[in-house]
């Protein structure tokens, strides 16, 4: 939260904590009713919660113009992510039309087996993400291809999505190239390498457990014999519809190279989309009208096999519009909470009750998770980082503890929230509802639990000297 925002929050009184509690209860209850009982989406409940939060803030003396400005600033903070989401939609459509995704699926079906597919997906996404630091890019490219491979091997889509997301967010969390991996230590007061080193103490055990669980889950398919005729029908369908060649693997390699060379995300993905259109025209014989259609509405074709149609008929800029609408509403809600100081009220209430070191660490983790499920990932890190930073130093707790907590409760919980930008993106891109895949995101579920155990027991908690407490940036 910037200084301007802090000054703005002084223009009104404190929204009573009981009202904030009512707001959060209303939000969760209305979303559950809408999604579970009415079979609808989270759009309207989130919009109603935003309206309720606005009335609460107005009742405490805030001006509507200030709240509206808070919404605008919140949306502005995620403008790059929204643009990137639109471009990824274009990339998916063009990569399918260009035969890039079909080629990845084709070779994956020939190489991977059902028994080790899930753990292999976890490992592949992890390695790619550590090198690139971009979870969205990997989910939108390699993730889409792995969903197709999993379908062909008879592995449930929710399990495949869980393995992809677990691997992607491990890499996103541990890569020095990731935005959140740089933001968390900056807010806490340490450097990125101390942050990654300290995170490994909770993340690596969670990753090992997740890998074991995916291995065990995959071995349950060892008696599951994939019908060769079915696999061959998928392979023949892909080969008759597209030109399949190892040359089609060049664009994914280019993505990795561009990220390693630190090409900015938006121009880099535009270049990747352009490369997909070239492959579509040169290797697949697509016309200009087909290329434009794939970029906007996604790939659409009848291959003669319904399962293949369901996998490939996706992508396009328009496929992301519903997702972006939800994100815009969620960001507006976060803007009202931030500008009215409701988030600070919750954090401050937790801080007052945190008399012991154990209580302080636990409070930081719980409020980080709460903020993640009610605001935006970046808002979570900024608000909680600034809220707890000085208190951690007063108690000689190394800031790497705080930066680790921001990632354990923030970054990893984002894809588990159905209305967060990460949750709606993963769901829209992989074609699996958040409510279906969350239980298989083993890393994302286990890591916060290990972090809570560390907070309660003091295991792996680092301390610092009085001299270190005087420094702006403290290293391990």
Image (cartoon, helix red, strand yellow):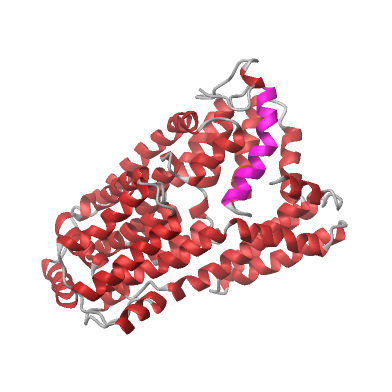
Residue 389 colored in magenta in the image:
yes
Q: Which quarter of the figure has residue 184? A: top right
Quarter of the rendering containing residue 25: bottom right
Looking at the picture, how far across and down is residue 147, in whole percent?
A: 31, 62
Which residue appears at 31% of the width and 41% of the height?
Answer: 212
Give the total of numbered labels.
Answer: 0
Instruction: Describe residue 115's horizontal placement relative to residue 395 as left or right.
Output: left
Residue 3 versus residue 335 in the image, above or below:
above
Residue at 51 percent across and 68 percent down: it is: 323
- The answer to whether residue 29 is left or right of residue 52 is left
Q: Is residue 178 left or right of residue 118?
A: right
Q: What predominant SS class does the magenta segment belong to?
A: helix
Tell me if residue 432 can be seen: no
Which region of the structure is painted magenta? 377-395
Identify the residue at image location x=43%, y=55%: 265
Judging depth in this view, the residue of 171 and 68 nearest the camera is: 68
- In the rendered image, residue 331, in percent from the top left (x then y), is placed at 63, 60
Above or below: residue 447 compared with residue 38: above
């Amino acid at each position: 939260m910037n200084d301007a925002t802090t000054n703005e929050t002084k223009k009104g009184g404190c929204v009573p904590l009981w009202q904030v509690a009512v707001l959060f209860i209303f939000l969760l209850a209305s979303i559950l009713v809408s999604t579970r009982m009415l079979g609808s989406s989270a759009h309207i409940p989130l919009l109603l919660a935003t309206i309720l939060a606005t009335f609460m803030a107005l009742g405490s003396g805030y001006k509507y113009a200030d709240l509206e400005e808070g919404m605008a600033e919140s949306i502005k903070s995620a403008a790059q992510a929204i643009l990137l989401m639109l471009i990824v939609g274009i990339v998916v459509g063009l990569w399918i039309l260009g035969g890039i995704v079909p080629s990845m699926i084709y070779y994956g079906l020939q190489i991977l087996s059902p028994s080790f597919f899930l753990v292999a997906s976890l490992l592949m996404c992890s390695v790619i993400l550590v090198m690139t630091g971009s979870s969205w890019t990997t989910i939108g490219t390699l993730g889409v291809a792995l969903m197709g491979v999993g379908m062909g091997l008879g592995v449930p889509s929710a399990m495949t999505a869980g393995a992809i997301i677990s691997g992607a967010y491990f890499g996103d969390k541990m890569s020095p190239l990731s935005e959140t991996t740089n933001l968390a230590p900056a807010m806490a007061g340490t450097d990125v390498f101390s942050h990654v080193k300290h995170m490994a103490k909770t993340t690596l055990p969670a990753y090992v457990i997740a890998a074991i669980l995916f291995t065990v889950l995959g071995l349950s398919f060892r008696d599951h014999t994939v019908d060769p005729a079915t696999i061959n029908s998928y392979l023949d369908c892909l080969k008759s519809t597209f030109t399949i060649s190892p040359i089609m693997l060049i664009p994914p390699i280019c993505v990795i190279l561009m990220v390693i060379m630190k090409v900015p995300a938006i121009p880099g993905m535009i270049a990747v989309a352009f490369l997909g259109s070239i492959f579509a025209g040169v290797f697949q014989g697509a016309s200009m009208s087909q290329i434009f259609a794939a970029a906007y509405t996604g790939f659409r074709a009848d291959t003669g096999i319904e399962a293949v149609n369901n996998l490939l008929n996706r992508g396009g800029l328009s496929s992301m519009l519903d997702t972006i609408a939800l994100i815009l509403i969620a960001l507006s809600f976060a803007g009202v909470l931030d500008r009215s100081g409701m988030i600070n009220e919750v954090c401050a209430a937790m801080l007052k009750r945190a008399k012991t070191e154990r209580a302080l660490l636990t409070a930081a983790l719980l409020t980080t998770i709460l903020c993640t499920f009610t605001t935006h990932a970046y808002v979570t890190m900024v608000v909680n980082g600034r809220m707890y930073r000085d208190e951690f130093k007063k108690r000689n707790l190394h800031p790497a503890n705080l930066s680790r907590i921001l990632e354990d409760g923030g970054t990893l919980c984002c894809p588990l929230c159905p209305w967060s930008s990460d949750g709606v993106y993963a769901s829209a891109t992989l074609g699996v509802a958040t409510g279906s895949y969350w239980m298989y995101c083993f890393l994302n579920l286990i890591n916060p639990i290990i972090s809570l155990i560390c907070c309660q027991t003091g295991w792996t908690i680092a301390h610092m000297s009085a001299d270190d407490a005087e420094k702006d940036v403290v290293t391990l």
